[in-house]
Image (cartoon, helix red, strand yellow):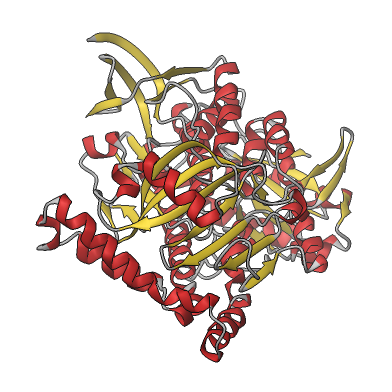
Amino acid sequence: MTSGESVPVVIAGAGSTGATAALLLARRGTPSIVVDRRRSELTHPAAHVIHGRSLEIWREASPALAEQIADMAPPIESVNLIRWCSRLDAMPLGEIDLASRPEQLARVRSHSDFLISHIGQHQLMPILWAALDREPLIDFRRGTSVGSIRQQPGSATVVTSRGESITAEVVIGADGANSGIRESAGIHMRGPVLAKMGSAFFRSPNLYPAEARPLLSWIYQPRFAGVLIAHADDHYVLMNTYLHADQAVSSDQQKYWATTLPEVLGSDVDVDIVSTGTWTMTSQTADVFRSDRLILAGDAAHRFPHTGGYGLNSGVQDAHNIAWKIDAVLRGLAGDDLLNTYEQERRPVIDLFARHSVANHFHLDSATRHFGVTNRALARATAVMSRRPLNLIPGRVAAPLADGITRAGLARTAILDGTGWRAGRARDLTASNIPGQLAHFVSTGLEYGYRYDGPLIASETPGGDTSPRDVVEYVPTTTPGGRLPHAVVSTPDGPRSTLQMVDTTPTCLTVFTFAPVEWCRALDTASEALAPLTTRVVDLGEVTSPSPAVELFEVGTAGAVVVRADGHIVWRGAGNAEGAAPRLIEVVGRTWHAYFVPQDEDSSDSHPRSTPG
């Protein structure tokens, strides 16, 4: 076993979560070793929904990286249709057109420099891995996994599959749903299994005309039920469910999909299978997100149904929340207890995303129950097949049994192609319930509106609900805990988002106000009371869009919105600086000073003055 290596941070897993954490830490000057069991990037697509918030976070790591990723996204007008059907060549049962409300799209564009994007994970990962390779502070080791972790005071030692022994001050477990490092640490996942999924990734140039290609097609047939996802370059993913590992969709994937794809899509469709796979749909969360020096993030800490697109994006948010805190601890600016606030802040958000995703999964039943297919029945069948006595039946017996259960569950879908009044009524009832599925596909309120609570947030309703006002529509607000609203600010370097004006130094609080002179004066006077924290004042009078910005920031022309390193709001006050600044100082003294370490009086950073943005 190789010994003697040490590094500030080891990151297990170079998926979107681990890669984001490494890049954010490198931006802050913190070196890391990143290991991933794969030797090459993911080729079988998993996630495909990229939130604008994720792009904002990647911009913090590298503006060029965020631009490169955003440039891959197809125009929203080309990925706007969500369709329900029995056959691809039949009249749809119903559709949702995400581009049918131009006024809503205009509002969404005003919330960020980025839009929600349709980018397959197989397209995203090569870009992130290339960024890891370019960064000199990141030692990226492919074909390597963490076999075990041993914790000692102030550090942890991981042993890799190559026999390397690496000691780090912090270890981030971002190695996915079947996290080896989580299992090595004895941390358990809790929550239900909802379904087992099989999928095929394939190319089909003549499946749809380019101008009429739905983003998602939910397909229901007597021998098949699943969803077809359109990707770039005439590529698609078709997914369905199964109940037992010995069913062909799991045990003989290539043969199963070679037979199934023509049956579902049409025998005249050209299909070139790229890869196949299986995965388990769960709603599970780890017992703890932090165990001493180990911090779990992404799928290693929480798993959701795919109905909502929160898996990849929540992992990026995890990395963003923890990176600045690790930076503060490693630089000696804060004590280890600061790392505890990661779980305090993220777990309620994860629970919120999980509830929304699970609700979406089962809400599909309101449309599909009219032809006898429900996700609730699927969840019950999945649970029954995994318990005694059925889980003791040999596979050669269990697989045909599972096939029979599946066919029985889909039998009533034949009515969708019928001609009688019952068939017409089933189609009409299905169609009438499809518009109610909108929150499944549009949840801008959650995308930007999730909020944190806890000791670093001066919550106006302590211990209260941190859910956004609306799941579908994002309503910008400066309520503490939320993301700072986006607005365009005129700077000497050109227009920039307010989010780009946030000082990312862990000990700096950025103060956004329309009264910069008054707030600079008040905070300079209070610099000794604030230390070791510093402040930077940004003049909202330079905001050029939207207008009027006073309404957007909700503190009038004299108040201030105070933001921490990750762009989340710590405190707001509507009064003038002379009256409100003492309240801010009291909040900081009562909360932040418990985590941040007083600096040496001889330090050049001791009691720095407030600086204007």
Q: How many marks?
A: 0
Image location (x, y in percent) of residue 504: 63, 36
Most extreme residue toward the front is: 268
Quadrant containing the N terminus in the rendered view: top left
Residue 337 visible in image: no
Question: Is residue 463 shown left or right of residue 29?
Answer: left
- The image quarter containing residue 145 is top left
Q: On screen, 439 above or below 1? A: below
Question: Is residue 320 shown left or right of residue 405?
Answer: right
Image location (x, y in percent) of residue 210: 74, 49
Q: On screen, 436 above or below 559? A: below
Q: Residue at x 55, y 32 (%)?
A: 125
Q: Is residue 467 or residue 364 the one in the foreground?
A: 364
Q: On screen, 278 above or below 91? A: above
- The image quarter containing residue 152 is top left
Q: Residue at x 36, y 39 (%)?
A: 295
Quadrant containing the C terminus in the rendered view: top right
Residue 116 visible in image: yes
Q: On screen, 551 above or below 297? A: below
Question: Is residue 409 shown left or right of residue 391?
Answer: right
Most extreme residue toward the bottom is: 421
Q: Is residue 125 or residue 595 the one in the foreground?
A: 125
Image location (x, y in percent) of residue 311: 48, 50
Q: Is residue 445 or residue 130 the one in the foreground?
A: 130
Q: Is residue 227 or residue 345 the one in the foreground?
A: 227
